[in-house]
Amino acid sequence: MNLSVPRRTLAATAFALAGLLTAGAPAATAAPSAPSAPAAALAAPDIPLAGVKAHLTEFQSIATANGGNRAHGRPGYKASVDYVKAKLDAAGFTTSVQQFTYNGTTGYNLIADWPGGDLNRTVMAGAHLDSVSSGAGINDNGSGSAAVLETALAVSRAQLKPTKHLRFGWWGAEELGLVGSRQYVNSLPTTERSKISGYLNFDMIGSPNPGYFVYDDDPAIEQTFKDYFAALGVPTEIETEGDGRSDHASFKNVGIPVGGLFTGASRTKTSAQAQKWGGTAGQAFDRCYHSSCDTTSNINDTALDRNSDAVAHAIWALSAGTTVPPGDFFENAADVAVPDAGAAVTSTVTVSGRTGNAPAALKVGVDIKHTWRGDLVIDLVAPDGTAYRLKNSSSSDSADNVITTYTVDASTEAANGAWKLRVQDVARYDTGYIDSWRLTF
Ligand code: DTR
Ligand code: CA
Ligand code: ZN
Ligand code: ZN
């Protein structure tokens, strides 16, 4: 049907028709977690691997167009800063670029503040954005830079309103000796340093032969990461070579609690480690460490995806102002296309190992990429077929994407079984897909 009618009128028409056609299940007690709710009520969304890898592709393009690297003092580094800054500015962050000079060359730190939250309790996450001069630095440290960027964008997509203030940093000249991060910390007045309740560092989190290492610095931060991986069933080890080896050291040196994640560099994976993590024993975690082969092919997607989700979990958990148990969650991250003005589609999560009924406050975290989200009707369907309406369609909600967590009173439902997220697009001219969803008990 080729109508020249303006889209909004179309949507209104389609919506009116849909309203007649959609025999909506009775709206359940489900209600979107109010954006002003403390982050403790919100589980972090899944960070889309595709989004993280899109940033890596851009970093690779920048290096290729600028002499093959993104090193301090080279054009590829400043181009990387400009790329990240533009994404953050468009997402509503307050950004600033801090210049410094090292070896007679100008360097840049990029700082991004998410408006709101208690400035006296600032949670900070960062990654160094520079590479060595011998290569594009995609794992070292495009991986950390991209994961932190995509998590920041997820904060914006969710319009998160955490109790604590959130700040993100991308550092220059780490490869020359933590120069940029030390410059940042040293330029902070002591009163400002004391407001940073924790700094999370991500440097090499997508190594091709990955290990899963957690920094053993601040116990609360360490436990937050350990809990996350435990909930995934992924064993972790304490990062033993990390002290002083990356930007968290700049913060630790002035007494700020730190933590972070690492998937390994030039050290060799042992056979015991290969037993628990897979990969190749007797081979370096990253054979392209500081080499020209540290390109977009030098990434393990599973490690990058898991660590990106761990970054988001820690940001949501640590900014909530209360301890947030990781929760026992069940997730389906397979993409499911939603046909335009078509039949409903479902994505299934099979819950097992639980006893009794589901909780009265069952968390339903959804991550649906879809332009004009007003087209969408979303239901949670319990194993016995009972439908709980999470979201009705709306002809006026023209915003994109549904990335939020609903709370459903599912206390009359048996916990174990096949739960389904059911999504239907009831209006023409916008499409999308279920990126992932999860149930947290
Ligand atoms: N110095 C980092 C790589 C590195 C080596 N060991 C650790 C431990 C924890 C984080 C990072 C690292 C670099 O080359 O950027
Ligand atoms: Ca996903
Ligand atoms: Zn390095
Ligand atoms: Zn690094």
Image: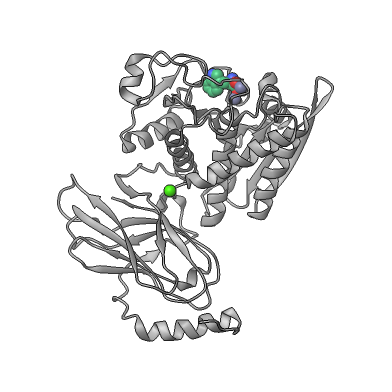
Farthest-out residue, left: 356
Furthest residue to the right? 104
| Quadrant in the rendering for residue 23 | bottom left
Left or right, residue 26 beside residue 117: left
Quadrant position of residue 341:
bottom left
Q: Is residue 204 above or below residue 287?
A: below
Task: Residue 253: tell me if it is visible.
Answer: no
Query: Could you say where residue 67 lies in the image, as x and y percent from the top left?
Result: 75, 29
Q: Is residue 122 left or right of residue 36?
A: right
Taking the image in four quarters, ligand 1 sits in the one at top right
Q: List x then y, in percent, for residue 113.
A: 64, 46
Residue 265 falls left or right of residue 132: left
Furthest residue in direction front, as rendered: 2
Q: Is residue 269 above or below residue 440?
A: above
Which is more toward the observer, 329 or 436? Answer: 436
Residue 260: where, in percent of width, then height? 50, 29
Q: Residue at left 40%, top 82%? A: 18
